[in-house]
Image: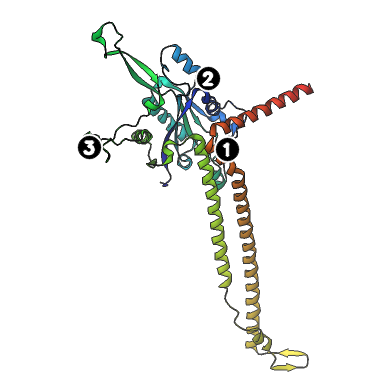
Amino acid sequence: MSKTDRSVARDQPYQKGGIGIRERHNERKNESYSNPDIELSRSHMNVHYRRCEGTYTQALDRMIAEGTVSTRGLKADAKVFGELVFDVNTAYFDSRGGYDYAKDFFEEAFRFAEKQIGSKYILSAVMHADERNKALSEQFGRGVYHFHLHVTYLPVVEKEVRWTKRCKDKALVGTIKKVIRQVSHSKKWAFPPLLDSHGNPVLKASGTPKRICSYSVLQDRFFEHMRDAGYTGFERGVKGSTDEHLPVIDYKIKQDTERLTAIGEKITEQKSVLKEVEQEIKSVKPVKATFDEISAVGRKKRLSDKVEMSADDYDKLQNLAKEGLTAQMNTAAQNRRISELNRRIWALQTKLDNLYAKTKDFFTAMRLAPERVDALFTDIADRRREAQRQSQSNRT
């Protein structure tokens, strides 16, 4: 098992006004995407375990109107949607049958999401099979795809509404009037207290209880659920890792960063090979005789213009000629190898420099304002399509 085969379950909250971008991405409603790894020709292979009736916002409004959930008392900028992303690194699925194995794996992950969220509060659940893993595709020389599951849901908790002092029947004051299903991301993923083996709260030095990161609990539950369902061969996501609560767009940035690192490692590897070749050239067997020794062969016995030599000198001269020719050929081959290695290093370095130059500002912008950047790219694509339609209309 690779040490990088780790399960990941992460969550990202969204406001009502910002969920549209995620919906267009998850449901593949755009005609083009800023992410070059998405291959829309494969989008028909994406698997829906739950399809949303209408848009995500329409589904929320419908459930509020039906009384299924309540947003009463929430601020205008409250996070009313959540998105769970379930994942194991690409190589895990690729080594186990790829697409078919991933479909079964994420169907079980969807069942886990139903247990954690409540089935009726899940709006959409879709496995993406159309996002290419650039690093592994380049490494294996074939298309390798990053399978993962997006689950969009409403974070609902049960809230007790109690009778107040305004109640005419004073005996009811403080008792439960009704229980409503409140949409609240912060309460859904509250930080529970850390308990010791006896069930008592573990206290800090200040006397306040220590609390557990809710996303760490989610990681534990997901890993245990999948293991109990028979899916093994991977480890739980690293505790304390940012993968426990990593926004989707940051995850993609992390992937590109890893690709930059991989290219850098290739350059280091090629330089190491180059160094070995240079050492081989230095260790070529030295010529057994000096130029003076070679020139002296046969000079002792010279009649007229002809050179006579002993059988030993003749054999020695033949051997020297063969050895020199062999050394010349070996040196030429090693020089060609060095040239090829230098060419590969230069190409990789150029590729690394270009990729870094192209993505540096993008990475910074995406970290600071991912939704704004995604919205900008979507707007640019929409304008381009509109310009194309207008151009076609003018020609007709």
Position in image of residue 273 (x %, y %): 55, 61
Position in image of residue 191 (x %, y %): 34, 32
- Image side of residue 186 versus residue 172, left or right: right
Position in image of residue 181 (x %, y %): 37, 17
**Residue found at x 38% / y 36%:** 231
Position in image of residue 78 (x %, y %): 45, 24
| Dot 3 amino acid type | Ser
- Image side of residue 229 versus residue 306, left or right: left
Residue 239 versus residue 39: which sits nearer the camera? 239
Disc number for residue 269: none
**What's the CA distance linking mark 2 and mark 1?**
25 Å
Q: Which residue is mark 1?
A: 37
Q: Which residue is mark 2?
A: 55
**Residue found at x 48% / y 17%:** 59
Q: Is residue 143 visible?
A: no
Q: Quadrant of residue 200?
A: top left
| Dot 2 amino acid type | Thr
Residue 339 versus residue 81: which sits nearer the camera? 81
Locate the C terminus by quadrant: top right
Q: Which residue is mark 3?
A: 197
Could you tell which of marks 3 and 1 lies nearer the N-terminus? 1
Q: Which element type, helix, strand or loop, lies under badge 3?
A: loop
